[in-house]
Amino acid sequence: METSTPALMTDHYELTMISAALKDGTAERSCVFEVFARRLPSGRRYGVVAGTGRLIELISRFRFDPAEVDHLRSTGVVDEATATWLANYRFSGDLEGYAEGELFFPGSPILTVSGTFAECVVLETLILSVLNHDSAIAAAAARMVTAARGRPIIEMGSRRTHEHAAVAAARAAYLAGFASTSNLAAGRAFGIPTTGTSAHAFTLLHDDEPTAFGSQVAALGKNTTLLVDTYDISQGIRNAIAVAGPDLRAVRIDSGDLSVLAQHSRELLDSLGATETKIIVSGDMDEYSIATLAAEPVDMYGAGTAVVTGSGAPTAGLVYKLVEVEGRPVVKRSENKATVGGRKTAVRRHKPTGTATEEIIYSQGVPDHQPNDRLLQRTLISAGEVQPAPTLAESREHLRHCLISIPWEGLKLSAGDPAIPVVIVPTA
């Protein structure tokens, strides 16, 4: 069941804390919260900030409408004073953070939320929900793009996740460098190129494969992709070229030993004169299977399940922690979950050649700016007003440059240390 606003996309205890803080007078205390990851998912060498554009739009319309307030009051979730506060809620604080498409590492303060305790804490669940999901998808997709070595990848995971998550996943994958998506809602909402032609069901609908291919070509022309593995792949390719001719755009293979089949298919297509017909492969593709096909005659990949599940890491592991109250650093000292107090400032340090060497995080300090340093945080919302932001295309290009800047070891798919070290400079 959907809600009319993003406001109920939150956890019960956020409102419980607000109720108590309103009663004891601490709700209006000036606070700073930060979003960061204590560690990267196993085997990962970098994270990717994604979802910022979606998040800012959601915060801008984060309101509790009358029906939602009545529901919370009638079910005893909030008392009358809290209900009144929620009815008037508008985020009037500040949001600063890493640009969408920026890389992050353990401890990176990727988002800083400043305002009163109550207005900031109520956003915790929404912020983590958006950033944890989208950043996980983008990191997995970026690894796939690296493994593909310039060959396009189609995002096609809509049927493997929640319908709303599918749209967000398509956006995150496109940010990471995917060429297109099968999801029409993502295409409309974010201007992502969409693609898609035919499934096995269409071939099975017809009396034989040539008839199915002929129907598709009649409707879509030769600039289409024919799915050739419903029955026998070799015969499927022969049928495809017999029907469409040697200028057929592409054939797709969705099963089997893709390495062997790609080689065989290329040889067969060439022998039939279809030297320009592309080969697209799909079927449970992830960064590792894509990498194993690097030397094979594959022109494009289709990836689905692994994309929308973060390729084994469905969350980025981000947390939202209070680090400052009325200008005073506060520290959580729990074992294995300790925090560093105070508002952080972060810079990325580079060699003159542009290669990143380390990330410096200053705790309550002014950055010791050096040549080739790049400040990582920018203003996203100021006093409740959304600030101009990069387009999705610009964020996509920003990530491409970020990946170029890290040492080549940081792009390996094998487990290892983060691509660059993070140094936290303590308060003087």
Image (tube, grey):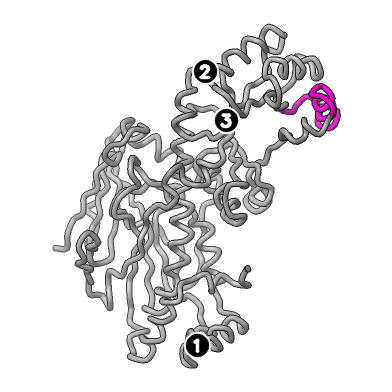
Q: CA distance from mark 2 to mark 1?
A: 62 Å
Q: Which residue is outermost to the top?
A: 271
Name which quarter of the figure residue 24 lies in.
bottom left
Marks 2 and 1 close (CB-CB < 8 Å): no
First in sequence: mark 3 vs mark 1: 1
First in sequence: mark 2 vs mark 1: 1
Name which quarter of the figure residue 427 lies in.
bottom left
Q: Residue at x 54, y 42 (%)?
A: 305
Q: Nearer the viewer, residue 314 or 32?
A: 314
* Residue depth check, mark 2 versus mark 1: number of the one nearer the observer: 1
Prevailing secondary structure class for the magenta stretch in the rendered image: helix
Q: Residue at x 54, y 16 (%)?
A: 260
Residue span colored magenta? 207-225
Q: Residue at x 22, y 71 (%)?
A: 329
Q: From what the image shows, is residue 417 above or below residue 187?
A: above
Q: Amino acid at mark 2?
A: Glu
Q: CA distance from mark 3 to mark 2?
A: 12 Å
Q: Secondary structure at mark 3?
A: strand
State the residue position of label 2: 296
Q: Nearer the viewer, residue 314 or 368?
A: 314
Q: CA distance from mark 3 to mark 1?
A: 51 Å
Q: From what the image shows, is residue 91 above or below residue 414?
A: below
- In reply to whether residue 130 is colored magenta, the answer given is no
Q: From what the image shows, is residue 387 above or below residue 287?
A: below
Q: Nearer the viewer, residue 23 or 415?
A: 415
Q: Nearer the viewer, residue 318 or 93?
A: 318
